Amino acid sequence: MSVFTVENPATGQVIAEIADGTPADAVAAVDAAAERLPEWSALAPRTRSELLTRVRELMLRDAGDLARLIARENGKSLADARGEVTYAAEFFRWYAEEAVRPHGEYGPSPAGGTRTIVTHRPVGVAALVTPWNFPAAMATRKIAPALAAGCTVVLKPAAETPLTALAIARLITEAGIPDGVVTVVPTTDAAGVVTAWLEDPRVRKISFTGSTGVGRLLLRQAADRVVNTSMELGGNAPFIVTASADLGAAVEGAMLAKFRNGGQACTAANRFYVHADVAAEFTARLGARVEALRVGPADDGHDIGPLISARALTGVTRLVDDAVARGAVIAHRAPAPAGAGHFYPPTVLTGLGADDPLLAEEIFGPVAPIVVWDHLAGLLAAVDNTEYGLAAYVFAELAEALRIAESLDAGMVGVNRGLVSDPSAPFGGVKQSGLGREGARAGLEEYLETQYFSVAW
Ligand code: NAD
């Protein structure tokens, strides 16, 4: 059996060695999921609901350990890791509640000669593939609705952060959910494992969270067997501030939308568009907050951790250096530690043109580029000029903010708020940011097929 190592991105130290899953292991996981499917899907919804409730209780019991584990393998601050555990556990509560609320229909056909019954059934064995940036929440946002719907699952976590998924799987077992209902397959051979799943006729669903590039690849592969797909992909969120905005709220929102998780979030504000009347004040106030950020390994003294890898650090460094070479200015910056960790200094960039190439890239780091605008029509055209359409943020007097929000090509808009993630709300994007939704009732429907009976009368 070969193994691979997991490193702490704050220190470069190896924190674990784990078995490296093979395509054969992937098939064995499907064997287990397929064997368990009839029994799991036939359980009373109330029983499944109570098991999900128990998983949440266990996650909250172990919240401190889970947060430390997330912080060690992902690098995020302890405060961010604690927030992620609470958010991740909440999906088990929400879907424990949804599990017992089936939706169906019964009624006469228009001509009156038949009755129509509409019901829903679990889609079957679901393959789940998750990224490293929220190692707990991206897993539970899929596992909880899949189990509530009556599906069994196989999960491939990112190779950078497999330990959190394994810890959650242990709690799922401790809660009393039978072995084989959820199997985690960590691997460095992502393509081999996921291809084995997509080629297996027993796998009826793939739910993927990650980059748009890999999402496109999996959509092509899924096409061969017409596998049901849900795709949560990349983003390029605009953060719009108008002259009517409450600047205190806008700066607070910017800190959350940009610097939570060190900017490594698909919903991270990626480009700031600030009205000329308030740009100087907004930039100064945001800059003061950014300069006060404490960057370092995850402990209570630090707000921001390292980027996930040396490659990520090189990528963010190159994006900023190129922008500066084109004339952008590093207006504010917090110090970041040197050494083995992949730390990037939180940075506010000004002096960018509205067509600067940086604004087209998903930065995935603690960098806030600010563009100044003064004509709304031009702003809105620039904002939607992207292949992405995941999140957006608008700070303005409420009616103005809602008018702008309604006009944006985005799946989610934070209106005078810097956070859109909420288990009770449908999370997802338009355009090349994805297909389908997670969270809310919609997140359960991703794991259900509709079936109807036409009844002779
Ligand atoms: P990634 O696409 O590189 O990896 C995501 C997952 O796909 C990992 O588990 C990885 O091992 C796997 N993978 C990689 N290549 C594969 C292949 N050829 N076949 C099968 N699986 C493969 O993304 P990442 O770097 O881990 O995560 C960052 C990206 O995820 C960003 O673009 C971010 O916006 C996006 N993201 C989106 C959401 C959302 O809800 N829309 C949430 C978090 C992250």
Image (tube, helix red, strand yellow):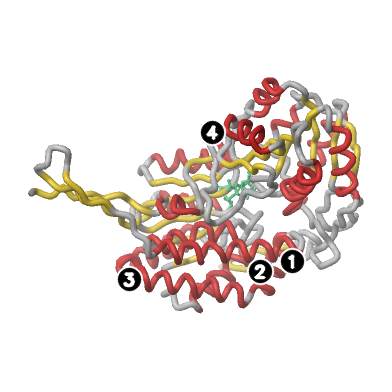
Q: CA distance from mark 3 to mark 1?
A: 42 Å
Measured from the top left, where is residue 397 in percent x and y?
70, 37
Q: Disc 4 or 1, which lies upstream in sequence? A: 1
Left or right of 334? Residue 440 is left
Q: Disc 3 or 1, which lies upstream in sequence? A: 1
Element class at badge 1:
strand
Measured from the top left, where is residue 89 in percent x and y?
57, 66
- Residue where numbered disc 1 is placed: 14
Is the Cβ of the residue at disc 1 closer than 8 Å to that at disc 2? yes
Q: Residue at x 59, y 59 (%)?
A: 137
- Residue where numbered disc 4 is placed: 431
Q: Quadrant of residue 414?
A: top right
385 versus 310 height, above or below? above
Q: CA distance from mark 2 to mark 4?
A: 39 Å
Q: Residue at x 32, y 71 (%)?
A: 44
Q: Residue at x 68, y 62 (%)?
A: 83
- Circle count: 4
